Amino acid sequence: MTILGAAQAAHGGEDPAAGSGCADHPPRMGFFTDTSVCIGCKACEVACKEWNTVPEDGIELTGMSYDNSVGLSADTWRHVAFIEQRKPVADGQDQFRWLMASDVCKHCTHAACLDVCPTGALFRTEFGTVVVQEDICNGCGYCVPACPYGVIDRREDDGRAWKCTLCYDRLGAGLEPACAKACPTESIQFGPLDELRDRAAARVAQLQAVGVADARLYGEDPGDGVGGDGAFFLLLDEPEVYGLPPDPVVTTRDLPAMWRRVGAAAATLAAGAAAAFAVAALGGRR
Amino acid sequence: MSDAEVTREGLRGVRPGREATPGTDVTPGTETGRRRRGRAARRGEQPVVPPAEFASYYGRPILNAPVWRSPDIPGYLFLGGLAGGSSLLAAGAQLTGRPALARASKAAAAGAIGLGMAGLVHDLGRPARFANMLRVFKVTSPMSVGSWILSGYVPAAGVAAACALTGRLPRAGAAATVAAAALAPGLASYTAALITDTAVPAWHDGHREMPFVFIGSAAMAAGGFGLLAAPPGESQSARNLAVFGVATEAAAFERMTRRMGMAAETYRSGRAGAYIRAGQALSALGTAGALLGRAAGRRGRAISALSGASLLAASAATRWGIFHAGLASAADPKYTVVPQRERREARQQERAGTHGQATS
């Protein structure tokens, strides 16, 4: 048995790999997904499925524009969202625009799925990413409602939890993840997180300078509720338009308060039981 | 395909394609770009979308739905509470010389936790790997903490019940009863941390009061079982525990749904609302019956037993209601999006306010 807690609870601040006990590690790697140049080709979805041998995730037509994979799940680790909008883009005219965005696991700095995993199947890699060990996971399902983004899920016929590994196997061999490799427009950019954040800041400034006022970064801020995402995005509308939560918070941020309340409640129950007998004795009845 | 090379120092050989700008001819310094900026400035404070509405991606939920199933998980929440409360009742009955109540409560605790554990293992995606729960101990995972509580509680409750029912090894039985009672308050309350330590709005947003709802529900169930099983001469403490439970649960639940905000709706509507209302009706009925049974002399036994059954059902209904409220709040994106937007906007306003003070 391994006792985990303090080190993982402290999360190691901006350096999650070190916070998880990986002292000498490569720089934290991640994705910057610039949705402004996404063309919705779904090469990332296909490359991910092929490399990671992710099973089929349904072949129905949903009617949701060109999106038939619907959202991230145990069998969809990259998901391209298609949003058809009629809104004023230029000259006050209602113009049609199409937003496309490739969603993926955020590899949070403070990862709720990792915190709540009772078996230690989820772990923090030396690259600062979050990966499930499929030989450990017993399919308890706790990570599923813990994730504030709705990423990780349990595979029905398999019983275990699955999600993006940021191609842990490829990273170990010095390769970039399959989705980034396949992306023809470099909407998906892979690299050290520090460098990606600099590049993203320059990109959003560039877009705003040419009048794309809606351009914004999502998940890049280390001060946000999850300590910043290892995979962050440049969006052209509000996050919820893409199916992303506007202000996600890692649920374990409130866990110390929860444990205090649980302790108080446990004491209340013990006191209530003692009082039940004391009152019975005082009342002279059994 | 990308020709970029990954090196430990970063990417090499990236193409300039990623510098492309969206829109037809919106490039730096062009007419379109400037005009668009001018129009955006004229628009001023008028929001494109009215603030009361919220956007979603085809109405799809933001969160993935909990994969926990009924009856396994709500059943465990109920049975774990019943077991915890019963172990406390058993220890008290043993110490104060109420042998029939002690025996019944020990049997209830062992039976409930046995059934509850079966539900937990059945709910796993890989039941054969349930022992992996004891690979690590993590305070950040209430499920891990609960697994360790169970690993101590289950043998203690089992030994206590076995000794009480067979009449053998009374000293070992007494020691096991005390051990089970020591772990019982933790068993009855940790499940609140278990469900509130998630992103599910109706669960997480109740994290301050949920432990008190749960221990109230546990006391109600255990007291109810005591009323059902113990002879009238020994049932007064069970009655008191049940009344304590009803009052605690009702007060904590009321406070929880009042403070929760928007997600409280899910406790009032749909399947969850039906369970919650049934639980409230049954607990009122059970409380009235328990108090009446005390006064009603010879027919009191039957009335007490009925009210005990009613209190057990009330505790279960509340757990099912809480479970389904969580599912409903995860299935509708508005419970995730609207409170988060409000939180973000409040923070931005606060920041703007402090900034204004600093500059003025």
Image (tube, coloured by chain):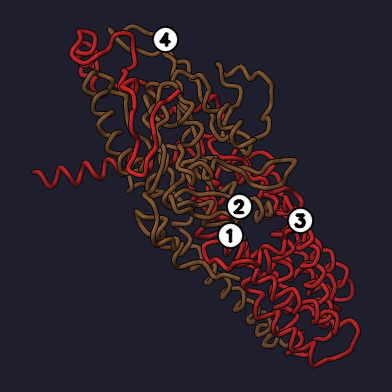
Chain colours: A brown, B red
Q: Which chain letter matches label 2?
A: A
Measure how far apart labels 1 and 4 are at the Cα level. 48 Å
Measure how far apart labels 1 and 2 are at the Cα level. 8 Å
Dot 4 and dot 3 residues touching (CB under 8 Å):
no
Dot 1 and dot 2 residues touching (CB under 8 Å):
yes
**B144 lies above or below A131:** below
Q: Which residue is mark 1?
A: A120
Dot 3 and dot 1 residues touching (CB under 8 Å):
no
Q: Which residue is mark 4?
A: A96
**B287 lies above or below B71:** below
Dot 2 and dot 4 residues touching (CB under 8 Å):
no
Measure how far apart labels 3 and 2 are at the Cα level. 17 Å
Measure how far apart labels 4 and 3 are at the Cα level. 51 Å
Q: Residue at x 54, y 49 (%)?
A: A131
Measure how far apart labels 2 and 4 are at the Cα level. 44 Å
Which one is in front in this view, the residue at disc 2 or the one at disc 4?
2
Which one is in front in this view, the residue at disc 1 or the one at disc 2?
2
Q: Which chain letter matches label 3?
A: B
How many neighbours does mark 3 have within 10 angstroms: few (below 14), some (14-19), or many (20 or more)? some
First reached walking from the N terminus: tag 2 or tag 4 = 4
Which one is in front in this view, the residue at disc 1 or the one at disc 4?
1
Q: Looking at the picture, which amino acid does disc 2 mark?
A: Gln
Q: Are marks 3 and 2 on the same chain?
A: no
Q: Quadrant of residue B44?
A: top left
